[in-house]
Amino acid sequence: MSNSQRSKVRKTAHKSGKHAGPTSRAANTTLDPVFEKQIISLIKRFTVRSLLSSAIILAMCEYALQHSSRPREVLLPYALVSAFAVAFPYVRAASHTFREIKQLGIKRFQLRKLADAKFALEYFHRFGQMSFDRDGEAHYYLIRTLIGLGEIDTAVKMDLWLQKHRSKFEWAAKSAVAVQDADRNRAASESNSAASTEAAGDI
């Protein structure tokens, strides 16, 4: 991304308020146990639905194959169609669950409750669950949260994933700018700290 593109992204994000985020209140870095239970409850619901759907699909396929006189190759398409009919409602329910988790995480970020936001949004970077963040928005807010918590190195790694897998969406460009700014600010802070230490040693 060119410098002019980065500048455009910064201006657009600043106007929309999506990049800059709220700055008027101090960040809360302590996880709220009530919020933690709320997210865990949503994840448990998703897990139970996943297991039930898998069990039903397997049972249906097994029953069809075991209790029919027709050849297996004839029954297989019917079994697959039945499996899809069971899986489709599950996929919709799972998408709804993760959409709710994303909204909760973003809301916590906007309230500067960074520990809560991190706890919720990290679920989108777990094996088998990244697909629920189709455009990278959840990862973008997770990266902003990590930056707010001072976890710059982790934010950089997360941004690399976002650039690789969601590069065609706007959130990847915004993430690149956010990480670049955070890295620059960290370098400046370390430089100032080193200069202060050196000046103190000369006294």
Image (tube, rainbow, N blue to C red):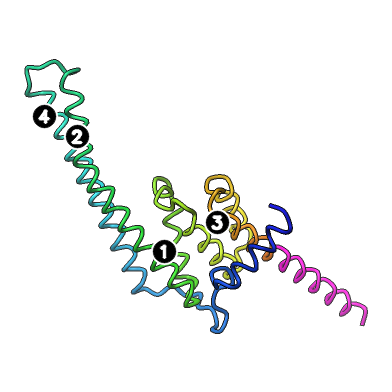
CB atoms of marks 4 and 3 within 8 Å: no
- Image coordinates of residue 101 in percent, x first then y, are 37, 63
Give the residue at mark 2.
58
Amino acid type, callout 1: Ala
- SS category of the residue bearing label 3: helix
Give the residue at mark 1.
120
Quarter of the image with the C terminus is bottom right
- Image coordinates of residue 37 in percent, x first then y, are 32, 68
Nearer-N-terminus badge (2/3): 2
**Mark 1: few, some, or many residues within 10 Å (few <14, many ≥20)?**
many
For the stretch drawn in magenta, the main secondary structure is helix
- Residues in magenta? 183-203
Cα gap from disc 2 to disc 1, whole angstroms: 31 Å
Q: Which disc number belongs to residue 63? A: 4
| Depth order, front residue of 17/121 | 17
| Residue pictured at 51% horizontal, 62% vertical | 142
Cα gap from disc 1 to disc 3, whole angstroms: 22 Å
| Residue furthest to the top | 71
Q: Which disc number belongs to residue 171? A: none
CB atoms of marks 2 and 1 within 8 Å: no
Give the residue at mark 3.
170
CB atoms of marks 2 and 4 within 8 Å: no
Amino acid type, callout 3: Glu
Cα gap from disc 2 to disc 3, whole angstroms: 40 Å
Nearer-N-terminus badge (4/1): 4
Q: Is residue 152 left or right of residue 117?
A: right
